[in-house]
Amino acid sequence: MPPRFKVEYFEAVFVFPKSEYFFHNQYSIIFVVWLLNFFFIFLSENILHTPIEYLKGVGPQRAELLRKELEISTYEDLLNHFPFRYFDRTVFTRIDTINDTTEYVQLSGKVVNVTEEGEGRKKRISATLYDETGRINLVWFQSLAWVKKNIEEYGHYVVFGKVSSFNGSYSITHPEVESFVRANAIAGMQPVYSSTARLTAMGLSNRSFAKITQALFQKIKAADITEILPFDILQQNALMDRYHALVQIHFPENEQRMQQARYRLKWEELFLMQMQIANLRLQHTVQAGYTFDKVGDFFNRFYNECLPFALTNAQKRVLREIRIDTATGKQMNRLLQGDVGSGKTIVATMSMLLALDNGFQACLMAPTEILARQHYQSITEILNTLHIPVAILTGTVKGKERKAILAGLADGTTPIVVGTHAIIEDSVRFRNLGLGVIDEQHKFGVGQRARLWSKNDKAPHVLVMTATPIPRTLAMTLYGDLDISVIDELPPRRQIIKTLHRSDNHRAQVMGFLKNEIEKGRQVYIVYPLIDESEKMDYESLLAGYEQVKSWFPEGKYKIGMVHGKQDPDERKRNMERFVKGDAHILVATTVIEVGVNVPNASVMLIESAERFGLSQLHQLRGRVGRGADQSYCVLLTGSGISKESYERMRVMVSTADGFVIAEKDLEMRGPGDVYGTKQSGILKLKIADLIKDTPILEACRHAALQLIDQDPQLLLPQHQLLKYTLEQKGGKEQWNKIS
Ligand code: ADP
Ligand code: MG
């Protein structure tokens, strides 16, 4: 910044009362606009940040569930919960066209045979809906009083819901029902929102979502939703303004307006992402880095004395790339791609030793506590004979222990720390952090990388690792600021794992197969979906599953262990160790075992309710077997009436072991309506844009972002203040205040 700026800026602010100068000075005007902007931000923030429970029709109980199931906790979150499609209230599916691949339908017909069945908690109401072509069952387990009061025999209704099939006949559980007359009164396109079984049971189905969203729009005004994209960009790209885009995406006047709204919101999402990337790139082209010019004792002793196997050529090549890169005096930003089991950990560890050899500290950051602890364990083991102190820092490390670790990092006596994002918290200071490794990059945002940089006055070298291979062109756009290394070779003597998909009906056969393998001396994993460790329902199904396994495999003859995230860490460790040592035949587990576990004698991975996992996760789980010399198997057990998408995921798993192919499929198949899918398998959390289908928008955004950064690198111009504020909220302030 030229010094002139500072003086005039100062005068403009402080000489204000006695000087006309203020209004005739361009910087004063910038300042005023800037102040006004903030005033604006604070005003508008208040209402959008209101907790969702205060919205009409929500209340505390539903609010709690909305937060847990869909991460919606404020008005703003609800605004951003976009419909995944729309339906026309005048178009109906004929009942005789429903088949096994049908998902959501809107039917029109008459209701008969409304009957109450069962006793107590098992009570339910069933009914039959018929049109000119056929009939279908309707079932309710909840809100029975409402059903009894509102559904009349022979009444004409519009019914909306998800079709399921059972014993060859079709039914809809908890359909949304509206009288034909009323339904016809509402014209236009109706939004369809993704919901979950539990939300629907609580009365928050698609249609009630529309109702609460409508209530929200009655509370907020156009001025509450401020434009964040600069005016030029809006104009040049013919984008709808933000307020109207939000209105039109929820309640479109017509198809065309809806498309315009979606286009604008995709643009916004991808543009913000590209701005962050463009900024990162700018920063490290101007940043000097530490020079790692020697390969010293730690690295060499490890290589000669501790390495338990020969490195693959790919590992050697990547290590060489890292060594060259860190020796240049420029700051390294490298993405390391390598399929599950390709041996990234050892590369990370040796890179950290390189930092130590040059007198620097190093850290390794993982996305979850469990992953961090597994890394910690394997790294302390690998480094055992070198006597290097390694610390672990996660959210659960507190009090005295935490204090001691922070002290060790600050004074440099602890050279290596492994942990979660707790490492990048402001309170953590390093004496001289030379290298930061980030595992599973896709679970961290771009902003985290920037925070790591700001740990020193000079940014440390950064190595990000991912097991999710990304097509190269996409990687260029997504990680445009990173250099890329690839481990394209698995350690030797790995077998192709045979993958089978079986439905529940074949359970007995599958269990027989497991017994066979155990008789041959092998061990077996049985994995249950536990999407969220805090979920009671999933937890109960895990325990029920455990009991079931015990009934197939009687205790006298078989030893069964169980591990899950709710166990106390010591117990989990003991159970895990029993399995590792071969003292248990079967390990019943959740995705806790997704990463890091290595039991070469385990030859079967049985995945229960496999339809509930995303592709990447299935691939990761499968990677737990096939680590020894024996033929290994992965069995995907699903229900018999799974959706088309789930079936396709199973098909992909059976047909390929190539992590690349799976990653591409995963990207391609992620749909915004598939809540579980997006939660688990998203390479990046995008709300509306699709990285594959929206490549043209992505390109345009990249271009616009580079141009903007070129024109106003620090986003100081008044017209960029709201954009800057939004980016800071997203990615942390550090990123945007760094260069000066
Ligand atoms: P990922 O890339 O999935 O993180 P890991 O680093 O966990 O893979 O390595 C998977 C397994 O392969 C580990 O047990 C590791 O010890 C082993 N491994 C890594 N490199 C080699 C190698 N060059 N030769 C043999 N085994 C190796
Ligand atoms: Mg790993």
Image (cartoon, rainbow, N blue to C red):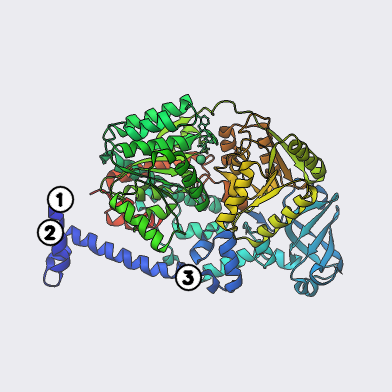
Q: Residue at x 54, y 50 (%)?
A: 259
Whichever of labels 2 and 3 marks the residue nearer the N terminus, that label is 2
Q: Residue at x 58, y 45 (%)?
A: 594
Describe the element under mark 1 as helix, strand or loop: loop
Q: Please name whichever residue, 321 or 264, is drawn nearer the observer in this view of the structure.
A: 321
Disc 2 marks a residue whose amino acid type is Val
Whichever of labels 1 and 2 marks the residue nearer the N terminus, that label is 1
Q: Marks 3 and 1, how far apart in space?
A: 42 Å
The residue beneath circle 2 is: 7
Q: Please name whichever residue, 738 or 289, is drawn nearer the observer in this view of the structure.
A: 289
The residue beneath circle 3 is: 50
Q: Please name whichever residue, 353 or 505, is drawn nearer the observer in this view of the structure.
A: 353
Q: Are marks 3 and 1 in contact (CB under 8 Å)?
A: no
The residue beneath circle 1 is: 2
Describe the element under mark 2 as helix, strand or loop: helix
Q: Is residue 630 above or below residue 104?
A: above
Q: Position of residue 323 (x, y in %)?
A: 34, 31
Disc 1 marks a residue whose amino acid type is Pro
